[in-house]
Amino acid sequence: MTITGRLVPLSTERRIMRFALTLFLSVILSVSLSCKKSSKAEDTAKFNPMPKLRNQTLRPVRFLPQWHHQAQFAGIYVAKAKGYYENYGLDVIIQSGGPNMPASTSLINNKTDITSLFLLAALAQREQGHRLINLAQISQKSSLMLAAKKENGINSVQDLNHKKIGLWRSDFRELSIIFMKMNKLDMEIVPIDWTINLFLKGPIDAMNVMRYNEYHQILQAGINPDELFIVPFSDTGLDIVEDGIYCMEDFYLQDPRLCKDFAEATIEGWIYAINHQKEAVDIVLEIMSRDYLPANRPHQEWMLKTMSEVILARGGVVGTLEESSFNEAQDLMFNNGLITKRTPYREFFPYAPQNK
Amino acid sequence: MLRRINSKSLTYQIIGFIVVIILVVMVVSIYTTRYLMSKVMMVNSKNYITSIASENINRIEGALNKTENQAINFRYLIQNNLLNQQEIDEMVSKHLLSSPEIVSCGLAYTQESSQTASSYVFCRITDRVDKLSLNPNVYLYQDWFQIPEMTSEARWSEPWFDTEGSHKLVSSYSIPVMDGTKVRGIIRLDMDLATMQNLVMPAEQKQMGYMFLISGFGTIVTHPADSLVMNYTIFSYAEANHDKQLREIGRDMIKGNTGFVRETGKGENYNHWLAYAPLKSNGWSLGVVVAHKDIFKDLNLLLLIQTLATIIGFLLMLGVVFARVIQINRPLSSLTQAAEHIGEGNFDVPLPKSNSFYELAMLTQSFESMRQSLKTYIENLRRTTEEKNRILSEVTFASTIQRNLIPKNTTENGGSDPLRIYGILEPAGDIGGDLFDYFPINENLFCFAIADVLGKGIVAAMTMTMVTTYLRAKAAYHEQPDTLLSDLNRYLCVSSTESNFVTIILGIIDLRNGSLSFSNAGHVPLFVRKADRSFTKYGETHSTALGVFPDLKIGMETIRLDLGDELILFTDGITEAMTVAESFFGIERLEQVIKDLHNPHAETTAKAILNGARKFSDTLDQYDDITILVIDFLHPKLP
């Protein structure tokens, strides 16, 4: 079963899409009210635009984003706010993420049911023996970048040699180390949390940034783009896809239907968010405000816009973890000794397309 | 009166001129005032705003310095191991309770010191102080620790929410505790952000504009709009408002520069003045924003009042000028009306009395004198005209009488009359000085005369009347033209009228045999035309003109007229008929006309000569009297 949708980012096409979605939603409502029992599970069916309401009572499911609420997870909030989860018979409880609630640990410890994770983090967890599986692949392109300050004399990759680089303690550390090896760079690594202040205040010369988040935060701290030396990992042969929707294999096997419904509703939420960015940002800001998180609209707008580009990056295939993307990530880790055994694609991503 | 105010009127001219001049002066004056005053206001405002900024900066700096000094004191005590842990705890607790701006205070050790487990923080919770241990897995990667650790320098942190300790938004002052050249740990004093926010913009300074504080990375720490605080940086705010200028201002602010700029960007900050200056201690920056209109509020009010006052004054003055002009104009207008009446001939219309102003009084006086002169003149003219008309009617009457004196042309010859006569007399004026006359003296003798009295008009006419009357009276006694004319000459000389100079041809025809005796006294020639169309000119004069010398000798000539002979007589009005180019008709042309005549016929001949002369002169004006007399001798008188 594939969860696919073709999106062409053209205004006319989008309008058609919006119209189609509206039509689609009204059909969902009418169908769900009139023929409740017509939908027996058909696991092998292709993506069916008719959602099924299996039970009258909603099935509760917990979702934990891998970080504080922000537009990086806009599709989830939109799917909840627009009632897509409810249409699929789900009562999704969106938990608050952040450094005190690490997503993978929470998943393993059953503090949540479904979470978002980077692909590399999920593969690393599998190496640890935790059998995570991918329900949907949100990101189709790497957003990771290396940013350095030109005022510290960094204008090329080689200028990074013998400089201090801040790497996140949790994610992408390995990817950056591989990058340094590839470019024969000898850099002093400073482990950092989520802050960009070390970079701004000067103790470190370079750091990892996500295009949709930290990069824009740096710009919002008064640094101009032309004052930064940027290396997007997507241009370096390390274009590893990132955000995906994950759950434990046990959880999936217990209720594959629920997992599939969650994934489908989430993708619908994303499509709506991409086509209605202003409304989506309103929803995100509302949630952030509820959690007392500092937020500003231009940053969330930037984040959603950048995420939209990442989601639509591969020919408009939305939601699918492509085998090539998976293999690329797994090979990279295997070859660099970060994992010792390979996971079959279909085992990791049960909704993989049938053999072509 | 208002109806009379058109663009040419005096009122319009005066008021229009004054309005334009005063309006120009008013506008120039207001603009000049505004320009000069705005310069002054701008300088004053700049000083005022800058002084507000400095005042607030000093206040905040005071609080920051106090915190910094406390931290330095703690470090001194800890670095030199002057106190044991219990003494430190007591001192810190006491200090926290007595310093409301500090909410927590802690000491955290570096990983290398192997004392991370001993790290702690004191938090004041209302009136008690709790000591909490710090989790190295968290604090080792927090800004307040990591940055001073790496730089070995004391630093103020960006505002952050302390979830471990005070659960408040704080800015931490972190100072490294050194062990030789190595950093052993970090002492941290947390200043409550609310305290700092209260230091900015106390209530009494809220009248003019507002202040905001941004951190070293542009985070908005205080701002009247709560939604911006800790959510936005000055840069994200600029991005939200698409305000590139504000972004540049923000960059200048976080560089620690001072400035005073006009913010012309979009959004709420449109047309504001922004003064900013850095907080030297922590690298933050304070901005004071004042709306451009607020700076010039007082000036604009002043100018508004000035403008209103000027307009009211202007309108008052306009009213006064208008009233005065109308007042001045009133006698002028009356004078104009009087002039119109006078122009229509009503000279008795009284002129308005005017004491308004000298010039008008003079004008009225001059006008009065002119009116009097005109009145007299017109009265004289009227009398003269009446007199002239009277005379004219008399002249006309005289003219009628004169015409009646001249024999009427008639075709009635009675069949046996031996003469056929036709005369034409066309005076140049109403009355003429020429004459012709003919009458029988007795049964056999027939007298005719043609004469020209010198001059024209009534005197000439009277003389002519005298001549005619005298001839008719005396002809019977003389029967010879020369004696008759001599008699007439004497009479004219004696009567001594002003104009008695007369040329004349007088002839007497014996009707029985056609014998013609005639005398020419200074007159133009006489023609005798034969039946065979030949003619003879008798140009000899027998004396000079009559009425000059009493003893004038006058001759005479006698010829015999044949059957069909035609006598042609005329006055100098014919020969001296002039063209516009002032050439005369002359004897030669007359002879040509006579030569071209056909059968003798008095009327035809007379009219042909008149037409010849008229055609020649070809002018409407006749300069002299024209007289023609033609006599055809048809046959001798039958016995």
Image (cartoon, coloured by chain):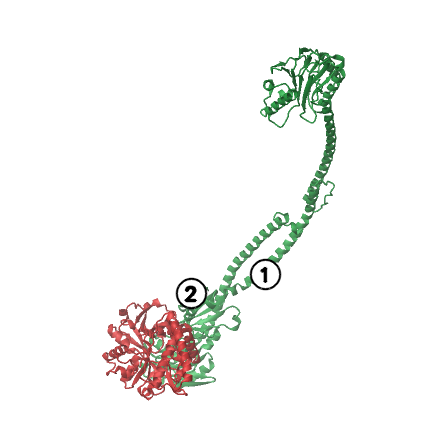
Chain colours: A red, B green
Q: Provide the residue designation for mark 2.
A: B245
Which corner quadrant of the image does residue A77 belong to?
Answer: bottom left
- Of residue B627 and residue B439, the one placed in the foreground of this image is B439
Q: Chain of mark 2?
A: B
- Secondary element under disc 1, as helix, strand or loop, is helix
Residue A178 image offset from top left, x and y in percent? 26, 76
Examine the rendered structure and indicate whether residue A250 appears above or below residue B557.
Answer: below
Q: Where is residue B227? Give x, y as percent.
A: 46, 75
Q: Position of residue B248 (x, y in %)?
A: 41, 66
Amino acid type at mark 2: Gln
Q: As rendered, which of B634 and B221 lies closer to the eye?
A: B634
Label 2 secondary element = helix
Q: Which residue is mark 1?
A: B305
Give the Cα distance between marks 1 and 2. 36 Å
Q: Are marks 1 and 2 in contact (CB under 8 Å)?
A: no
Q: Which mark is residue B102?
A: none
Near-viewer residue (B318 or B525): B525
Q: Is residue B323 visible?
A: yes
- Locate residue B625 relative to residue A195 in the image: left or right: right
Is residue B180 or residue B513 the one in the foreground? B513
Q: Is residue B279 visible?
A: no
Q: In which image quadrant can residue B103 be found?
A: bottom left
Looking at the picture, does residue B543 appear above or below residue B375? above
Badge 2, how many Cα within 10 Å: few under 14, some, many 20+?
A: some
Q: Quadrant of residue A169?
A: bottom left
Decide: is B60 above or below A249: above
Of the 4 image quadrants, the one containing the C terminus of chain B is: top right
Query: In the image, residue B233 lies at what x, y percent?
Result: 42, 72
Crowd tier of the residue under label 1, counting other residues whose Cα lies within 10 Å: few below 14, some 14–19, many 20 or above: few
